[in-house]
Image: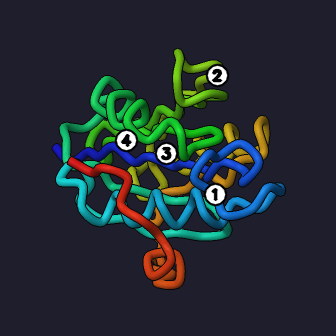
């Protein structure tokens, strides 16, 4: 069986992030600090970014939402909202949960099951959550090409990765 847990986080706006250099709606500082922290965090296998969103392939069992929630709590001051995807391309299932706040229970969930193949496991679940909440939730580590934006890493400060 092959499965994974992916975390999507959207950086907090500068006006909501105490360590920001500015007081506006720009998410750059929080996003760059998330990336710098994840770079040193052993709970993150790999990460990538796109437009103030950070995508992390977590170093845990598949469907480990408790693990993801613990990590999310550690990053809470830098995060506006988040999505956790649990997917399995053997059973062809994907479950995405949305966290309006990184400090609390999820507020929305969508589960997808595909009967033919697992090529797009989780993508429909992520798309539904994205459409409902405006966060660009995706899985750039499976069946799509991710990209690394080093400009965030160069500007970020590690906020205590584990």
Distance (Cα) linking label 3 and label 2: 15 Å
Residue drawn where x is 27% and y is 54% of the image: 44
Residue drawn where x is 39% and y is 51% of the image: 118
- Which quadrant would residue 99 be assigned to in this image? top right
Q: Are marks 4 and 3 in contact (CB under 8 Å)?
A: yes
* Secondary structure at numbered mark 4: strand
Is 55 above or below relative to 114? below
* Residue 41 visible in this rendered orientation of the protein: yes
Q: Nearer the viewer, mark 3 or mark 1?
A: 1
Residue drawn where x is 59% and y is 45% of the image: 126
Write down the residue under mark 1: 20
Distance (Cα) linking label 4 and label 1: 34 Å
Q: Nearer the viewer, mark 4 or mark 1?
A: 1
Give the camera-side residue of 95 and 18.
18
Give the camera-side residue of 49 and 162.
162
* Secondary structure at numbered mark 3: loop
- Which quadrant would residue 3 be assigned to in this image? top left
Q: Earlier in the sequence, mark 4 or mark 3?
A: 4
Q: Nearer the viewer, mark 3 or mark 2?
A: 2
Q: Residue furthest top?
A: 105
Write down the residue under mark 2: 108
Q: Earlier in the sequence, mark 4 or mark 1?
A: 1
Residue drawn where x is 33% and y is 43% of the image: 5
Which quarter of the figure is the N terminus placed in? top left
Distance (Cα) linking label 3 and label 1: 33 Å
Write down the residue under mark 4: 87
Is 26 above or below relative to 42? below
Q: Earlier in the sequence, mark 2 or mark 4?
A: 4
List x then y, in percent, for residue 130.
Answer: 71, 45
List x then y, in percent, for residue 150.
Answer: 46, 84
Write down the residue under mark 3: 122
């Amino acid at each position: 069986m092959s499965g994974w847990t992916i975390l999507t986080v959207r950086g907090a706006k500068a006006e909501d992030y105490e360590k920001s250099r500015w007081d506006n709606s720009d998410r750059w500082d929080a996003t760059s600090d998330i990336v710098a922290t994840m770079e040193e965090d052993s709970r993150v296998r790999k990460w990538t970014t796109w437009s103030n969103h950070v995508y992390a392939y977590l170093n845990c069992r598949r469907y480990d939402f408790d693990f993801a929630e613990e990590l999310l709590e550690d990053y809470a001051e830098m995060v506006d909202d988040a999505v956790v995807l649990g997917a399995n391309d053997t059973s062809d299932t994907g479950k995405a949960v949305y966290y309006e706040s990184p400090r609390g229970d999820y507020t929305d969930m969508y589960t997808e099951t595909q009967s033919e193949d697992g090529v797009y496991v989780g993508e429909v679940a992520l798309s539904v959550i994205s459409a409902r909440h405006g966060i660009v939730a995706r899985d750039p580590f499976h069946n799509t090409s991710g990209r690394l934006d080093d400009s965030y890493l160069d500007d970020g400060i590690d906020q205590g990765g584990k």
